Amino acid sequence: MSIGSLQFVVNRPRGPLGWWILVPILGTAFAALWWSAQGTQLSLKGLIDGLPWIGDFISRMLPPSFSFMQKLIRPAIETVQIALWGTLLGVVLALPVCFFAARNLSPYGFVFHALRQVLNVMRGINEIILALIFVAAVGLGPFAGVLAIAIHGAGMLGKFFAEAIEEIDEGPLDALRAAGASTLQRIVFGVLPQVLPAWIGVVLYRFETNIRVSTVLGMVGAGGIGFELISSMKLFAYEDTAACVIVILLLVLAADVISSKLRAMIR
Amino acid sequence: MIEISGLAKSYGAHQALKNVSLAIRPGEFVVVLGPSGAGKSTLLRCINRLVEPSGGDILVDGTSLSSNRRDLRLLRRNVAMIFQQHNLVKRLSVLKNVLVGRMADLSPLLSALQLFPEADVKIALHCLDQVAMSHKARSRADALSGGEQQRVGIARALAQQPKFMLADEPVASLDPKTSRIVLTYLKKSCKESNIAVLCNLHQIDYALEFAERVIGLSGGEVVYDGPPSGVSGDVIRSIYPGLDDPNVLDAAQRLTERRRAAAETELRAGDMRSDGRV
């Protein structure tokens, strides 16, 4: 097919239906979206009607209470501390597991599959839910937040660490095997040098994510700045809420900048 | 001495090696010629058990290999390997890559802490010297050129102080000049330490130039086992069935004749010396 001097270069879809295949695909997609719109009560009118209320909310947040901000320094520091230890404990939990969760290193197939499922479960539960569980276990406060982030993070890191191991060049491992090296030596000299840059990148990214997560952990009583945010809202002190939002934004931006700088350095 | 008898290896229905029998004597430089897929790599990898043979016997210095882990490490210490893609650990230093050759003798725990006995570091540096790479000992492996990386690969194999060396197409990804340099270092350093070499090559000319003995492998079977001077056009055609390139056959013919002539003059010179005429 050509339009003037332009030619339309797209292969006819394979299969007996040809272009007609688009009818059932688009039809199904449209039906699924329509169905979900009903389920979620999607409504443009609702949004437009709500706009004045949003405006009202924002106007009550202004001006942000800068005096309250001074009280946020401690919770902000606590937020960073939760992220720091949550990330570190996540790494500590993920490290011994990841070698067995990598297809190319795992000694037995069932070990690999079992560990991948364990990591899936750890990763599958959201930090807020884990925080609720740990608040019940170790009481209100930042420690529950650290544990929640560590467990969820270990599930994430274990998977990413293992995937990095699966992507290495196995030639050097052959060479180490041919030289009679032991398993520990193969890991230290064959695997680690190859995966370390990727691992550091993943850990920094996790730290950045954990800062973001630990800003909301306080909503369920697991420490950090989220507690101030939720209580200011409950007290209708919206200027204080605005201060919280600004501090959270600063924290997230700083984490983003620092981690991307560090990741650029190890390339 | 490596004695191989009736070696077979099949991958599913595909027979990579069928009934291969040959012997490698101490200190000799043997080149294996054969088309891609003839089983050259499989042959080498069966010897150090990177590949598990399906049948036959391999005796290294009279002992058969069990797949017992400790025995395997001992075997592999005596049988070093050089790879086509060098297989250096790119982010490690040249010296540490060569120290990999010492691993079988080192304590796993101490080496994991990056602690190495001075004697082993000395051996590693000496091996780098043998391939003229000691000036790059502290460089990262990925900062070297392909030829230099392969010389480090040779040094790593030498560091094992092995009796045998398996070289799997060591120059397949190098230009002709670099190939010659690498093969020269390989042969020289192995001669110095009386290491027997079994080297897979694709280049007939290098095979005829460097080999003391040529083994022709085709379709998983040995079709020639003899001196390079015996590699005639017919032998080449039997190693590479269907090869109908007059240039290759011509070149091989000329090389063989030149080698034979050189051998004869040397022989005659030797005769004259023994006759007391010179």
Image (cartoon, coloured by chain):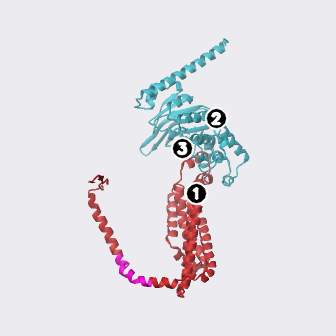
Chain colours: A red, B cyan
Is residue B274 in view from this perspective?
yes
Give how far across and how far down residue A14 sits, in percent. 30, 55
Image depth: mark 3 or mark 1 in front: 1
Which numbered disc, 3 or 2, marks the residue that appears first in the sequence?
Answer: 3
Look at the magenta stretch and give its main secondary structure.
helix
Chain name for mark 3: B
Residue B245 found in image quarter = top left
Residue extending furthest right? B118
Q: Tell whether position B39 is magenta.
A: no
Q: Is residue A148 above or below residue B213?
A: below
Cα–Cα span, label 3 and label 1: 22 Å
Residue extending furthest bottom? A235
Cα–Cα span, label 3 and label 2: 20 Å
Task: Give the labeled residue for mark 3.
Answer: B85
Task: Give the labeled residue for mark 2.
Answer: B189
Q: Are marks 1 and 2 in contact (CB under 8 Å)?
A: no
Q: Are marks 3 and 2 in contact (CB under 8 Å)?
A: no
Relative placement, left or right, of A84 versus A166 is right
Image depth: mark 1 or mark 2 in front: 1
Task: Give the labeled residue for mark 1.
Answer: A197
Q: Is residue A28 above or below residue B26?
A: below
Q: Which residues are magenta?
A: A37-53
Q: Nearer the viewer, residue A98 or A4?
A: A4
Is residue B60 in view from this perspective?
no
Give how far across and how far down residue B214 sits, in percent. 53, 30
Asked if labels 3 and 2 share a chain, the reply is: yes
Kindly identify the amino acid type of the residue bearing the numbered disc 2: Ser
